[in-house]
Amino acid sequence: MQVFREWGRALEELLFPPELPCGLCRERPALDVGACRICLDALNIRWEKGAAGSYPYFSLFPYQGFGRDLIHEMKFQGRIEIAAALGVLLGTACREEPDLARVHLLVPVPLAPRRMAERGFNQAAVLADNIRGVWKRPVCSQIVRVRETKPQSGLSLKERKRNLRRAFALLPGTSLKNRCCLIIDDVITSGQTFAALARLVEHYGGRPMGLFAARTEKWGLEEVAEEL
Ligand SMILES: [Zn+2]
């Protein structure tokens, strides 16, 4: 009888799949992009193309209001499921963007080991893994942080550049030659971290582009939160 009950349950789940909760609020049922309509509206999604110097990048929503609160919760309250949900949204947007069709590799911005230990996960790596889930591109984890850097927040533009000098390296045995590499992180503020990684990719013959969940609309030190 037990077997029949299990079959019954399996059949029921097949016919009436349980509604998954929204990955952002965990309250309302999710649409097929993994978040609910109310959260999507509150994020104020506007897919935009920008550039840091000569390096193009895309971003999904402004770093303010609900979107900013979510990113704070993700980082400082360890809510990894927010990074997963944002990754699905980003992957869905990437699939629709013709300029990204030539991307070969997803390159999450590596997190400093000390911050990794504090947070328990690298939000950029979680974003990349979930982007890969909906937009089939391999993740390159061969770019690493080789030098502990100070948090970028509170530094001037010049200090930010200096802070990032020789911060990243490519592990031996990896070729980026002629590969279009999409550098991924949760927020772009001054763009210095992105530019430092983009220079590294270029140095090894790759073609860098960027992808960020959120962007600061106007860069000023007082409103820069954390380019960690
Ligand atoms: Zn929601």
Image (cartoon, rainbow, N blue to C red):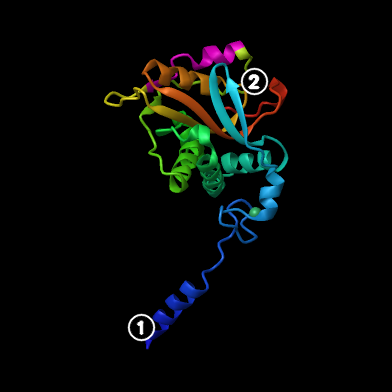
Quick check: 207 above or below 70? above
- Could you classify mark 2 by the number of other residues whose Cα lies within 10 Å: few (under 14), some (14-19), or many (20 or more)? some
The residue lying toward the viewer, choosing from 100 and 1, is: 100
Within 10 Å of disc 1 (Cα), the crowding (few <14, some 14-19, many 20+) is few
Q: Quick check: 144 left or right of 47?
A: left
Residue matched to label 1: 3
Whether residue 109 is visible to the viewer of this picture, yes or no, is no
Residue 74 x/y as whole percent: 58, 43
Of the pair 118 and 71, the residue shown nearer to us = 71
Say which label, 2 or 1, has the lower sequence index. 1
Q: What stretch is highlighted in magenta?
A: 158-169
Q: Examine the rendered structure and indicate whether residue 218 appears above or below residue 67.
A: above
Q: Which amino acid does label 1 sit on?
A: Val
Circle nearer the viewer, 2 or 1: 1
Kindly identify the amino acid type of the residue bearing the numbered disc 2: Gly
On the rendering, which quadrant does ligand 1 occupy?
bottom right
What secondary structure is marked by label 1? Answer: helix
Split into 4 quadrants, where in the image is the C terminus? Answer: top right
The residue shown at (57%, 31%) is 58
Is 128 left or right of 60, judged from the image as shown? left
Q: Distance between the residues labelled 2 and 1?
A: 62 Å
Does any portion of residue 102 appear in the rendered image?
yes
Residue at left offset 58%, top offset 12% = 159
Q: Please, is residue 61 above or below residue 152 in the view?
A: below
Q: Nearer the viewer, residue 60 or 6?
A: 60
Determine which residue is flagged by label 2: 154
Q: Which residue is drawn at 58% across and 27% down?
A: 227
